[in-house]
Image (cartoon, helix red, strand yellow):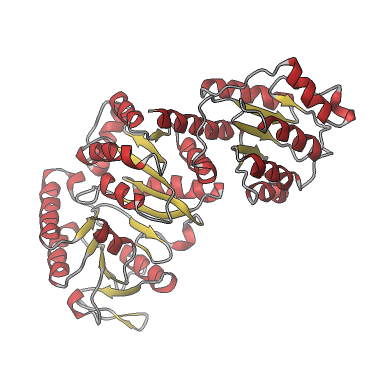
Amino acid sequence: MEADLQAMFNPGTVAVIGVSTSNPFHPANIIYNKNYYGYDCDVFPINPRGGELERRRVYRSISELPKKADMAIVAVKAQIVPKVAKECADAGVRSMIVISGGFAEMGEEGRALQDELVEICRSASITLVGPNCFGVYAPPVVDSFFLPPERTVLPRRGNIAVASQSGAFLVDQIMTNFHEAGIGLSVAVSMGNKAMVDEEDLLLYFAGRDDTKIICFYIEGIDEGVRRFIASAKEVAPSKPIVVFSGGKSERGKAAARSHTAALAADHELVEGALRQSGILEAETESEVTSFCKILAFFQHRPMSLCNIAVLSSSGGHGVLTSDLAAVAGINVPEFSEERQHEIRRLLEPNIQDIAALVNPVDLTGSASDQDFERALDYLLSKDDIEAALVLTLPYTPMMTSFVGTRLGQVVKKYDKPVVAYVPNLAKYGMVLEGFELNGIPVVHSIEEGVQMMKALRLLGDSCAR
């Protein structure tokens, strides 16, 4: 399957079938224009009526194209799709994305239509993604999402591959949240009804991509493809962490999944147990999806076994909140001995030595300087029982400068232990944020997100222990 999927994600020539000469907002037109102007593939528009689109020829059939198409993106009525698939088969097309809905998600009649489509594709060795999907986003080569580029937010290029049964969830939640969090994508796939290409196929393909280090899936329900995906994850997870977020946990959610992508319902406790046994990290919320993926992008090979972290803050209240959230997430904020507190105290500037609370969380107070944070973090990361640290920076404190992230980044490079920094989400603190992230420290804008990142490393440690 990998060679076929290569044609899907790296096509030289793409045919967009269903382009309209009268409706510029037709999904096929959006796909065609987006790829013509912004991506590396050669792209051709097709409509049985022919004509012109912005003085460019619209071909009547895929057989008329001046060169063989590696992939066809189909956006026509469901009833016409099998006929289009036969034409693609005759033209030697290697892969096909069917955007159109109206298949198995609509009931028995639609399922019969989907079965016919699959039979045509299998007979011609065409790799099919969909139907009822957005397809693939594989920059800089191709983007089959039928969304206007001026209305969508795309993450930067990175090392995380994402696959989702829901195209809207992929774009509105995962890709938008990744952009906001500064997380990069290698490729993204909307699977839709998964008539042919399913979770296991994509998992094995992602595992073989050199530009992909973390793999993320959104699934609805469980079927044979998901079962095979879970079994294969045991082989992939040790080298490339896998994050899964599943929908359809409630009875209403299960019913919605069936009508959405014809997904089969399953007892979530059984799914949860199977995921855990395969070394998969299950995110419980949308926020955890982003937090898990971001920390793994920075520290994918740093699992925690003791689950002990140090918390450095210039605010006692922030430290209290962190302790509460950490306890729920199964993260330890161990109390420091008098001896350790004494060692930290003597490293601090004289003006805060008598007022800092150093039991862990370490409250350096609002009078702490960059140097106080740097020295305390350096000392704590040197201890074998401290596996990671959360640094809660409040840049409006008078002694902290915009270089705090750069300075603490040098400490992290020295010890190679995970450190996460909390920075309030304000434009004026952009230089502080960049100082952290450019020097290997991921930034969060809420304490909850920081604790979620530590939870990911705890779960990664649990999976490594199995």
Along the viewing direction, whichever of 361 and 179 lies nearer the viewer: 361
Residue sitting at 74 percent across and 28 percent down? 315
Left or right: residue 378 compared with residue 14 = right
Occupied quadrant, residue 81: bottom left
Examine the image and state in which quarter residue 268 appears.
top left
Residue 304 image position (x, y, % from top left): 52, 30
Q: Position of residue 97 (x, y in %)?
A: 26, 59
- Vertical position of residue 306 compared to residue 176: above or below: above
Relative to the observer, which residue lies in front, 448 or 436?
Answer: 436
Q: Is residue 354 left or right of residue 110?
A: right
Q: Is residue 425 visible from the viewing direction of this image?
A: no
The quadrant in which the C terminus is found is top left
Query: x, y percentage for residue 44?
Result: 30, 75
- Residues 33 and 333: in front is 333
Residue positioned 26% across, 36% down in the render = 231
Q: Nearer the viewer, residue 16 or 124?
A: 124
129 up-or-down from 366: above or below: below
Residue at 59% across / 20% down in the picture?
324
| Residue 385 appears in view | yes
- The relative height of residue 407 versus residue 375 in the rendered view (above or below) is below
Occupied quadrant, residue 310: top right
Q: Residue at x 67, y 40 (%)?
A: 423
Q: How many marks?
A: 0
Q: Is 112 on the left or on the right of 168, as rendered? A: left
The residue at the far right in this view is 351
